[in-house]
Image: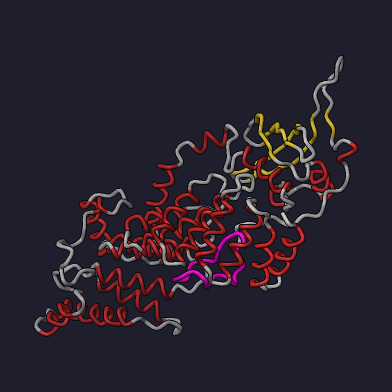
Amino acid sequence: MNQQAFDAGRDAYRQGDYVSAVRWLEQAKQPGEVSGRIDHLLGNCLMKLGNYDQAAIAYGDALQDASYGHAGALASNRGRALLAAGKPQEAVASLVMATKDSGYSTPYKAYIALGNAYSEIGDFREAGVAYRNAAIDETNPDPSGALRSLGGCFMKMGRAVDAVEAYRTALDFSTPLESQDAIYEDLGLAYAAANRWSEAIDSFGHATDSGNHKLSDEAAAALEVAKAAVSSQSTGASGSTDAFLAAASGYGSGNDPLDPLGKSGEFIPSPEDTGFFDITEQEMVQLEMDNRSIRRKHRSHSGLRGLLIFLLFLILIGGGLSYAYYCGYGWPLQESVVEDLFTTKANGGDISGLLAKNLSDEDKMSIEAVLPSGATGVTVEGVDRSMTESSALATATLSAGGEQSYRISLVRSGLGWKVSGVTVEYPALEGGQPTISTGLPAEQQAAPAEGEAAVTEAAPETTEVVVPEGEAAPEGA
């Protein structure tokens, strides 16, 4: 690596001079060199400049550097770049790869992009599966957005009743700072598609109560249809009202509201075709009858059934999590945390995110000093697991040659693990006991070189506009 060119490119990137950054970074690699660190940053610069095809190539080159890691973030970025370049089919393959990386800490980002890619190619069933996975990812700070997209997939497939449940659950998961007007509009359209006119009128009313939201033309037409339908039901009138309902985009007619011309050859598909909710048609009819007979007094109850469905899904996929937790397993595993610790240090990154929160500054500095700079590899030899504390033995290949063993102490942090201590471990002395040191040999005790923070998957907010349809900006900026 041409360190001087890389430093210049990195500084230009930080200053927002992406053109100069690209020029310097292209000079930073030697002929034939593979460097995930350089190509990751280069890909981010190209995304900023709107050069999506070249950005995808750069992220792909970064993936060739197995020692760099960050495979999930890189594959996710590559998928976003391909999606922005108008290549959704290629984007799907890269985004699926991102979701398979067990060390990827924020898979919901890849799942949301994957849902968008499947939507681009018209596969709304797979898009819905991806959005659902994004919604139940505990790292997702905005599950309501994914739930709203899930509702949109249900609407595309003609599952208006399922869409209602998705939108109502989205409302329950939306934060007080978010405007719920748009979700209420979507909910109103779903109610109208299900011929539930009173609920549709109520939802459209919520959407416009604040005075800050204007209904779309489609929603405004659906509102008029709903009002006419309620009026017709209350008065028993027919004639012009029935004709009006029949002519209004299929609402109130015998046709599927999402397919007014009957091109699909069928009306509402069977629930088994959706693949989302394990519920029979008879149960659907019963739910419909219950919804018409029971008025909820508080909106906080509105997402109960949808929430129960998600809880059932979580139970199905997490039946063994409690036992695994008791046995000392977590997410990520201790092995992944140890590997990330050594890799981040070797790349000159910031390891503070991997350390236990209750460590003092002195303890953190001690760990920083013990870890080898520039290590070319690390192997986790074994892990002693328990529910709240674990220890791992790792062997690092030093940049100067040779190997060194380390004992890493870890403590439970939520479902995962954080590092609480690192010691150098030496072989047993002849005729004596093994010796454990809290520092490095004298020749390695120099303060670690100042390194550039590793490129992570968190992207600057300024890149949020580069991906079509409001897609989030590339990670790792």
Q: Where's the N terminus, which quadrant?
A: bottom right
Q: Is residue 358 above or below residue 394?
A: below
Magenta span covers which residues? 459-477
Q: Is residue 447 left or right of residue 161?
A: right
Residue situated furthest right in the rendering = 442
Residue 47 position in % (x across, y down): 56, 67
* Residue 177 seen from this side: no
Name the residue nearer the viewer: 140 or 97. 97
Name the residue nearer the viewer: 34 or 161. 34
Residue at the (71%, 50%) spot, across then down: 347
Residue at the (48%, 67%) spot, across then down: 471
**Principal SS element in the magenta part?**
loop
Residue 419 position in % (x across, y down): 71, 42
Q: Where's the C terminus, which quadrant?
A: bottom right
Residue at the (70%, 48%) spot, across then down: 344
Q: Is residue 254 left or right of residue 6?
A: left
Magenta highlight on residue 465 = yes
Q: Is residue 350 above or below residue 197?
A: above
Q: Is residue 278 left or right of residue 405?
A: left
Residue 192 position in % (x across, y down): 26, 72
* Residue 358 seen from this side: yes
Q: How many marks on residues?
A: 0
Residue 299 position in % (x across, y down): 41, 66
Q: How is the image coloured?
A: secondary structure
Residue situated furthest front in the rendering = 31
Name the residue nearer the viewer: 90 or 296. 90
Magenta highlight on residue 210 = no
